[in-house]
Image (spheres, rainbow, N blue to C red):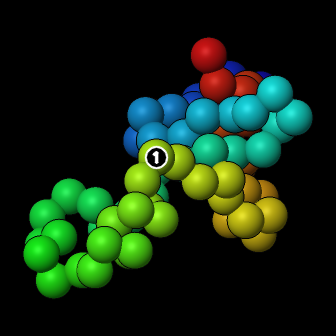
Amino acid sequence: MPKLKTKSGAKKRFKLTATGKLKAGVAGKRHRLLSHNAKYIRQNRGTKVMTASDAKIIKTYIPNGLP
């Protein structure tokens, strides 16, 4: 059997927490921020834990875990 490779895009974008959940940066923070209100910008600061359904798909991209 060949080795399973990790998708290089996934290893750049996601981190695993100690309990095995996936963290990712929040979308919508790069540009066009003047059209968003302060609450939107404040709530999308930092990272968020991915939902279980999204995490299930992403974990197939990282078969050997993240370094």
Residue 48 location, quadrant: bottom right
| x 55%, y 40%: residue | 14
Q: Relative to residue 62, is residue 7 drawn left or right?
A: left
Asked if residue 62 is positioned above or below residue 56 in the image, the reply reads above
Asked if residue 18 is positioned above or below residue 58 in the image, the reply reads above
Q: Relative to residue 35, is residue 52 drawn left or right?
A: right
Residue 42 location, quadrant: bottom left
Disc 1 marks which residue? 46
x, y (%) of residue 1?
A: 77, 26
The foreground one among 49 and 54 is 49
Residue 17 visible at all: yes
Q: Amino acid at mark 1?
A: Gly
x, y (%) of residue 22?
A: 69, 45
| x 67%, y 58%: residue | 50
Q: Relative to residue 7, is residue 52 drawn left or right?
A: right
**Are there few (<14), some (14-19), or many (20+) residues within 10 Å of tag 1?**
few
Asked if residue 43 is positioned above or below residue 11 in the image, the reply reads below
Residue 58 visible at all: no
How many discs mark residues in the rendered view? 1
